[in-house]
Amino acid sequence: MQTVYVDVLIALNLLISWTMLRTCGELCRRRAGRGRMALASLLGGMSSLIILLPPLPDPVLVILRLALAMGLVRLAFRWEGGWMFLRMTGLLFVVSLLFAGGMAALWSLLSPRGLAVHNGTVYFHIPAWMLAGAATVGYLAARGMGAALEKRLPEKLVEGYAVQALGRAGYLRLLTDTGNRLTFSGLPVAVIGKKAAGFLPPEAAAAAGDLSLAAAVGRAYPGKLKFIPCRTAAGEKLLPGFEAELKRERDGAAFRCFLALTEEDCFSAGEEGVDGVIGAVN
């Protein structure tokens, strides 16, 4: 009978949870803060205590694993809408099933010494130095995967920002275009698509691409609406915009800007997760 050491069990599954969350984030081009990732990984490690329970039916295990995936994603990553949450949850759920299935197959075929798989949870009695080595390998693999995925769009050019405008709060991923010199009243301008403007009041978001509707919005928000001139390859046009506060996720730097709304939602062909574009900011 396999002896299970609870400290090794939690530490091993904490590492597994961290590696799977990091991989999920790299595949979806999302970053999690260290504190959020630590809490989520700890939850993943503590969930491994299910191995100590009597055998559970497979449908129950699937439901529990799905609920755990939802909890881990919600803890580790900032909320960016229901679609992204479901996408990341589904990806983490599939990755965890593949991992558990692979370990179960290994255990059934080879029965390696010290390995136990029960209730969909893996236990392997290994020394601390091997845990540290596995953590290093997992980290390097996740970083390598992220670098490969970001060859066309280096991660340093994409920043996450918390945004506040018209009394509403949201989150944006903006592509930094160092050649973009668009400013208004001395402030940088972030041009975002109609979908990304969903955190704004509905009537304000609907003004993207419709200047007549934007005028009505201006009456609803006196002094808030500005028409920002913008020059593109197709010519010059006016974009409805609102003053906003941005706070950069990477370093907490905060600054004022204008949000200019456009009906186009694609800012970098073939790339996902980019809500808009902004000129170089300090």
Image (cartoon, rainbow, N blue to C red):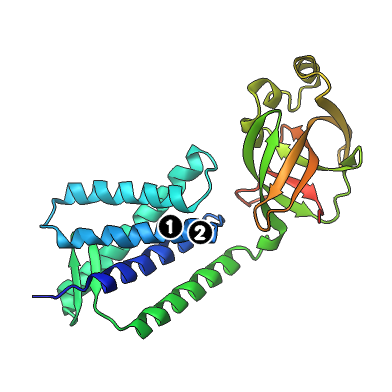
Residue 271: image x %, image y %? Answer: 63, 52
Q: Say whether marks 2 and 1 touch (CB < 8 Å).
A: yes
Residue 26: image x %, image y %? Answer: 53, 61
Residue 187 to residue 217: above or below: below
Residue 265 seen by the camera: no
Which mark, residue 35? Answer: 2
Q: Residue at x 47, y 59 (%)?
A: 37
Q: Who is closer to the viewer here, 183 or 254?
A: 254
Q: Amino acid at mark 1?
A: Leu
Q: Is residue 153 left or right of residue 128?
A: right
Q: Residue at x 81, y 53 (%)?
A: 281
Residue 173: image x %, image y %? Answer: 65, 48
Q: Residue at x 56, y 66 (%)?
A: 146
In three-dimensional space, the C-alpha distance between marks 2 and 1, rounded to whole angstroms, equals 6 Å
When asked about the image quadrant of residue 259, the answer is top right
Q: Is residue 218 left or right of residue 54?
A: right
Residue 92 seen by the camera: yes
Q: Residue at x 31, y 46 (%)?
A: 67
Residue 81 to residue 269: above or below: above
Residue 111 to residue 16: above or below: below
Q: Secondary structure at mark 1?
A: helix
When asked about the image quadrant of residue 172, the answer is top right
Which mark, residue 192? Answer: none
Q: Amino acid at mark 2?
A: Gly
Q: Who is closer to the viewer here, 113 or 245?
A: 245
Q: Residues within 10 Å of mark 2 (few under 14, many from 20)?
A: few
Q: Secondary structure at mark 2?
A: helix
Q: Who is closer to the viewer here, 183 or 8?
A: 8
Q: Which residue is mark 1?
A: 39
Residue 27: image x %, image y %? Answer: 51, 59
